[in-house]
Image (cartoon, helix red, strand yellow):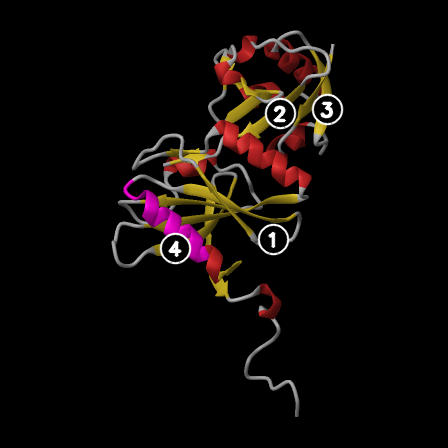
Amino acid sequence: MLVIRRDLVDAMVAHARRDHPDEACGIIAGPEGSDRPERFIAMDNAERSPTFYRFDSMEQLRVHRELERNDEETIVVYHSHTATEPYPSRTDISYASEPKAHYVLISTRDPEQHELRSYRIVDGVVTEEPVEVVESYMFAHTGADDTPDCP
Amino acid sequence: MAVIVSIPTILRTHTGGQKSVEAAGATLAEVIDDLETNHGGLKQRLVKEGALHRFVNVYVNDEDVRFAGGLEAAVKDGDTVTILPAVAGG
C-alpha cells in the first residue's frame, strides 16, 4: 500500500496537468528505509513527448547525489499518461528497476477528472496496490476511528 | 589504474550487496571488462551488442558517457564511474 500526503498527490497532478499533452515525470524522495514519500522532485522529461518519457540524465545524476548526501532514497517514481489509462505500458515495465519503489501513474486523458494509481513492478510483474491519501503522516495508522481513546 | 565504480541497487546482486567497488582500466570498456572478472554477470547488464545498454546511464565523474565517447570514454586513476538505471517509459 502507498500512504501519501495529499499535498504530494496534488503536486504530481498539477505537474501532469501543466505538461499535458506531453508526459510529465518525477520522483518523491523520503528517508532511507522509511517507505514515506516526503520531498517532491519534478524532473524534466528529456523526450518532451506525449507517448514517452525519460529522465534527463544530468538532472538524474544531480538528484542521485543529493539523495545520497541526505540519506534519502526514491520512494515514488511517477509519470503521466496523457491519452490512455493509468496502467504501466510494456516500456514502463521493461525499464522499471526499483523493486522497492511505488510506481505512480496519473492519467490526464479527462480534462476534468484525473486518475491516479500505484503499482509495484518487480522482475517484470506488475501488482496494483491501494493508495491511502492522508493529511499528515503523524496521524496515519493510529488505530480504527470507531474505537474511542477514553472509556 | 584504480577507479571507484558506484553500483545501483538493482545490480548489487552482482557485487555481493556492495554499493561501490574498485576496478581498473584506461577506458570505460576496460573498466567494465575488469568488473566482469570480479563480479560476473555485470557486463551483460551494461553492454549489449558492443554498446551501452539503453537501460543504464553511465557517468565518468560528472559526465554522461553517451556524450563522451561511450565505451571508449577515457578513465583515469581516481575517477568515479557512476552507474544509474535509466528512468524511462511510455
Q: Does residue A129 appear in this view?
A: no
Callout 3: helix, strand or loop? Answer: strand
Residue at 26% in and 45% down: A83
Do tags 1 and 2 sit on the same chain?
no
- Residue B70 shown left or right of residue A106 in the figure: right
The residue under label 2 is B82
- Element at badge 2? strand
Task: Look at the numbered discs 4 and 2 and tell me whether their residues touch, using CB distance below 8 Å.
Answer: no
- Reading the image, the residue beneath label 3 is B21
How would you rate the neighbour count of disc 1 (Cα within 10 Å): few for under 14, some for 14-19, many for 20 or more? some
Which disc number belongs to residue A57? none
**Label 3 is found on which chain of the structure?**
B
Prevailing secondary structure of the magenta residues:
helix
Instruction: Check the residue under mark 2 and report the chain it is in.
Output: B
Q: CA distance from mark 4 to mark 2?
A: 33 Å
Mark 2, other Cα within 10 Å: few <14 / some 14–19 / many ≥20: many
Mark 4–mark 3 distance (CA, rounded to whole Å): 39 Å
Is the residue at mark 4 from the same chain as the one at mark 3? no
Write the residue at 40% across / 35% down: A45
